[in-house]
Image (cartoon, helix red, strand yellow):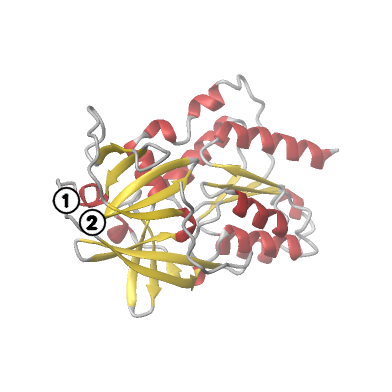
Amino acid sequence: MAEYNSGILLESGTNEIEIMEFTINGNLYGINVAKVREIMMSAPVKPMPHSHFAVEGIFKPRDIVLTVVDLPTYLTGDPSEKGPRDLFIVTNFNKMYIAFRVHTVVGISRISWADIQKPDKTVSGGTEGVATGIAQCGEDLVTILDFEKIVAEIAPETGIQMSEIDRMGPRISRDIPILVAEDSILLGKMIHEALYKAGYHNLTMFDNGQELWEFLEIHENDENLSQLVSLIITDIEMPKMDGHRLTKLVKDHPKFQKIPIIIFSSLISDEMRIKGQELGADRQLTKPEIGHLVDVMDELIEQAQR
C-alpha cells in the first residue's frame, strides 16, 4: 500500500497535529493525517454477508484486501447513495488497513492540539459519542471523528479483549498509583476495566495530556510524589495536549523524568516509534494489545522497585 505524505513534517513534542478535512452530506469532518495512507477514487466493492450495516464490503486495489466502511451510512444510520465522485480514505491504525467512503476531501490544516476542544455530550452523541474533538481550522469548525470507536463498534473482535486478562490467571492486587491519559470515553472505560481486572486498583484517569500534566505540576513539590504516581500510560491523540507533548514535558522535568511512561496508541508506526524514543518514552505499544500492556507494566514496576 502506498504511503500518503502530506508534505509537512511535524517535529516531535510540539503539540501539533495535521487534520485532513473531508465532507459528508455537506458537513465538515476531520481525521488525523497520521492515520491516512492513501486517498483514492471510490470503486465497486464485493458485498460481505452478515456484516455490520455500515460495511460496504471488500475490494483489492493492488496488493491488499481492504474492508470498506460507508461512513455516510454509519453516521446517519440510513443507506446512502453512492456518488461517482465519492472518495475512499485508506487508513492504517491498530495494525489494520480500512477504507472509509467520504464525499469530498477538502484539504489539510496544521493546528495545535490546544485548539481542539472536547465536544460536550449533546454534540458527541452521548457518553460514548463518535466525535472525539472539535477543531478550529481557519474559519471552519471541524468535527474530529473517533475512528477507533467506529471500528471497535463495527468489529468488536478488533478492540480491547478482556479475554487477554482472563488468560493471565489469578493476579495479585497492587496499590501502585497509575496515571492514564485517554480521551476516548469508550476506550478509557475498557482500559480501566482491564487494568483493574489485572490487579491495578489505584488508577487515576485523565481525559487528555493537559489534565494529567496539571496534576503533576500541582504535586511537583510533594514529598510523597511516589505515592501519587509510579507509572504513566498515555494515548497520543488527545485534545488540549497530545501524548508526545506530555512525554516531552515529563522527561524534561527534573522531578518527573524518572517516572516510567508507556505510550499506548493506535498510531505506533515506525515513524511514531522513532518520535517516541526521541522524547524518552520507556515503552510504546499498539492498541488494542491490553495483555501486552499489563506485561510491560509489570516489568517496568518491577524494575523500579529493585
Which residue: 42% across, 39% down?
A: 63
Amino acid type at mark 2: Asp
- Residue 44 is left or right of residue 199, and the answer is left
- Residue 64 is left or right of residue 54, and the answer is right
Q: Residues within 10 Å of mark 1 (few under 14, many from 20)?
A: some
Q: Is residue 200 visible?
A: no
Which residue: 74% across, 52% down?
A: 259
Which residue: 68% across, 38% down?
A: 297
- Residue 116 is left or right of residue 100, and the answer is right
Q: Is residue 162 visible?
A: yes
Residue 150, x across and y down, in percent:
35, 45
* In the depicted structure, whether residue 250 falls above or below residue 72: below
Asked where in the image residue 224 lies, by quadrant, the reply is: bottom right
Residue 299, x across and y down, in percent:
74, 35
The secondary element bearing badge 1 is classed as loop
Residue 242, x across and y down, in percent:
55, 61
Q: Which mark is residue 82?
A: 1
Q: Which residue position holds label 2?
A: 86
Asked where in the image residue 141 lies, by quadrant, the reply is: bottom left
Task: In the displayed orientation, state which residue is furthest to the front.
Answer: 62
Amino acid type at mark 1: Lys
Q: Residues within 10 Å of mark 2 (few under 14, many from 20)?
A: some
